[in-house]
Image (cartoon, helix red, strand yellow):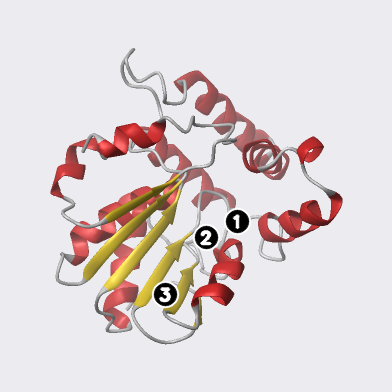
Amino acid sequence: MTSLAYLSAGSGEPVIFVHGWGLNSGVWNEQLKSLSDEFRVIAVDLPGHGLTEPKDKKMTVEAAAGCLRGLVDELALENVHLVGWSLGAHVVCRAALLLGFDTSRSLTIVDGTPCFVRRKDEDGWAMPETRTRWVLRGLENSFVETLTEFITTSCYTKKEVKPNIERIMQSVFFNEHFPPDKKSAIELLTDFVESDIRPMLPELKLPCLICHGDRDSILPVEITKIWESF
């Protein structure tokens, strides 16, 4: 039995939301409110994040997908819609394959990339490896400070956000369950840096919605074309 903590609201076909790296289920609070009239909305905390305890074994994207599959089995869910943000996109893609297409009904990718770190020169849309290694070193030395800076610069720019919106975003990203467990977060990011799910994408025979913000400071909106190529 899985030990993933989660928030749940509503009834109907299940929609499972998986947060991005370093965050927790609280980032989906508005989605729980707006979709619960029509769906059973479930927002999970990955291991070591939010209210989910860290795992004894090394935390990887594949292990997170296995936990998500365990939750689906535990709750006896069918016709599951999977939504993943950033690192969560890798988790839901891998989980969809583990669950099989009799259980998975659709995928929604939010600000995700099939390969986070540049592997080849033509992967100009991907993150330079030197930048991710710099972040990892910073996390080892000053975990909370580096994580806070990463989220702040990645998710919103204070100069472009009105004060009332900034307060909302602060409560979303830096809520009472922030920060995550240091070991779990670093292990997940380290594995995410190595993760490339492009080879498995042709196997995902599911309806898929790709959502990407045109002000994303990490990955350009053109990343959507990479997903579309599959």
Q: Position of residue 100 (x, y in %)?
A: 16, 65
Query: Looking at the image, is 30 positioned above or below residue 128?
Result: below
At label 1, the amino acid type is Pro
Residue 180 circle label: 1
- Of mark 3 and mark 2, the one earlier in the sequence is 3
Q: Position of residue 181 (x, y in %)?
A: 58, 55
Query: Looking at the image, is 150 positioned above or below residue 128?
Result: below
Determine the residue positioned at 20% across, 61% down.
98
- The residue singled out by tag 3 in the image is 3
Are the residues tagged 2 and 1 within 8 Å (C-beta)? yes
- The residue singled out by tag 2 in the image is 48
Q: Position of residue 206 (x, y in %)?
A: 20, 57
At label 3, the amino acid type is Ser
Q: Measure the alpha-carbon separation of dots 3 and 1.
A: 16 Å
Q: Position of residue 156 (x, y in %)?
A: 69, 42
Q: If the image is split into quadrants, where does the N terminus sit?
A: bottom left
How many C-alpha atoms fall within 10 Å of the one at disc 1: few (<14), some, or many (≥20)? many
Label 1 secondary element: loop
At label 2, the amino acid type is Gly
Determine the residue positioned at 47% across, 68% down.
44
- Of mark 3 and mark 1, the one earlier in the sequence is 3
Are the residues tagged 3 and 2 within 8 Å (C-beta)? no
Residue 6 visible at all: no
